[in-house]
Amino acid sequence: MSESKYREWILDTIDSLRSRKARPDLERICRMVRRRHGSEPDRTCAELEKLIQEQTVLKVNYKGSISYRNAAKVQRRSRKKDDVTLTTAARRSAVEEASHSDLSNGDSAFGPVDQDEEDLEADTSLAMDTDSNADEEGADESRDGQDRPSPGRTYKDAAVHCASVRAVSAPCSPSGTRPGPGPASGLDCASFQKAGERPSSLPPSSPRALTHNDWAYHSAVCPAERQHPGMQRDKAAAMKPVIHSATTSPCALKNNVKKEDEGKAVDSGLSSDQLVPDYAAGLDETRNVSDGRPQALSLPSDNCTLKNKIDIPSITAAEDSLLNGGKGDEVFVKKETMSQNLMQWTVADVASYFSAAGFPDQAVAFRTQEIDGKSLLLMQRSDVLTGLSIRLGPALKIYERHVKVLQRTHFLEYEDL
DNA sequence: AGCTGCGCACCTA
DNA sequence: TAGGTGCGCAGCT
């Protein structure tokens, strides 16, 4: 309701700014929305964040400053390359359809996501400092406590509050500090929503869509990393290895995955575009992984169908491998086992899974909503974010790290079989 | 003062 | 060459 209203306002505002050749940045958007509709900048900012998460709006770093794009329009731009990407994209289509169909309400704002990002996923981390982590956090705060008094807050304050991004992105700004040499570096942080976000039929705002120096951020998820632009690179670099080892070690994928990654590095050169969806989620995940949490997620219930068959890392690795062209048999086997079971998960299994994944509170919500394996496969982003009445933070993590991964893996496997 | 329109330069495909 | 983007400036309210 009010959300769609905001969505409309914000998109109109972005369009309006664009039409008058003004940069659709946070400040202008907030100002215009306020002037036209009387909405508080904070609120506008929060809503904008949501739209970014949905990819209805793309957040990009263009010529050194943050701009927002109406994803529905951006995506019209580049199709050619998308066609190329379709190879992989097509495979995901099933999942993607499921996860996006209602999300974007036809806006098809699937911008920043593209397999390119997947390709880059690993390496891109280097370039991603740009991001807006603080942003997210700020936005989250706004969301959590929207009533938060913002007396006398100016648009700029809001901008700062919501998009500390700017400060953060400064380092990679135009002045040439963009991480990484040349455009190739532009691609970075990709991964975040990497796979599965875009219906194959929507070549949308593939990275290419945002040309120039656009960097799309998915500002929703990934916080920490982005906050420290300076250290991000290092951090990311440091993490990379962690990711792999942590991810692969448990299973036989190890070698395959590693090779894939090497390949990725190369590929990334291609897609090097500018799109930089917040891939922090990935890093975030990484962190968890290294913490040893989700990864070795041994399924909780003893009687459940999942039992010891699944472990997040293996799924992820398998997926990565798959999405990147990996063909390790082991991967397939693993996945097969996993998704067959997924169809058989009971409500209790699902709850146990999330509980074991570190979301005990949210697991209750799944149980309450009677989400079993089949339902889980049908869940869309919006279902997870809003349908379970769970907090946005964990909801995002659950969706991006678990639901989406499970769905993707399941459908991919389905196609492969 | 703030909003709007737009010429123009820049950039990518 | 076409099309997207946005700076910078002038005019308007």
Image (spheres, coloured by chain):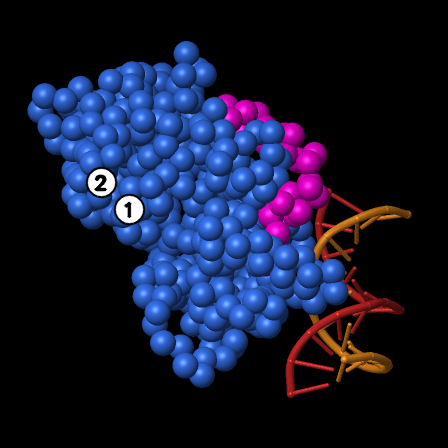
Chain colours: A blue, B red, C orange
Residue A80: x and y in percent read: 70, 34
Residue A203, image x, y percentages: 62, 35
Q: Residue at x 48, y 47 (%)?
A: A54
Mark 2 lies on a secondary structure that is helix
Return the chain for callout 2: A
Residue A414 position within the rendered picture, expressed as x and y whole percent measured from the top left: 41, 16
- Seen at 54% across and 40% down, the residue is A105
User: Which mark sits nearer the N-terminus, 2 or 1?
Assistant: 2
Which quarter of the picture shows residue A407?
A: top left
Query: Horizontally, is A157 left or right of A372 in the view?
Result: right
Between the C-alphas of marks 2 and 1, the distance is: 7 Å
* Depth check, front residue: A79 or A183: A79
Residue A198 to residue A237: above or below: above
* Disc 1 secondary structure class: loop
| Residue holding disc 1 | A389
Q: Is residue A270 magenta?
A: no
The three-letter code of the residue at mark 1 reads Ser
* Residue A243 appears anywhere in the view: no
Q: Locate residue A372, reporting x and y percent.
A: 25, 26
* Letter of the chain that mark 1 sits on in the rendering: A
Q: Tag 2: residue type? A: Ala
Question: Can you tell which quarter of the image residue A122 is in?
Answer: top left
Up/down of A384 relative to A325, above or below: below
Residue A30 - label: none
Image point (65%, 47%), residue name: A74
The answer to whether residue A136 is left or right of residue A67 is left
Q: Could you tell me what secondary structure mostly forms the magenta stretch?
A: helix
Q: Which region shows up in magenta? A: A68-93
Give the quadrant of the C terminus of chain A: top left
Q: Mark 2 points at which residue?
A: A365
Q: Residues within 10 Å of mark 1 (few under 14, many from 20)?
A: some
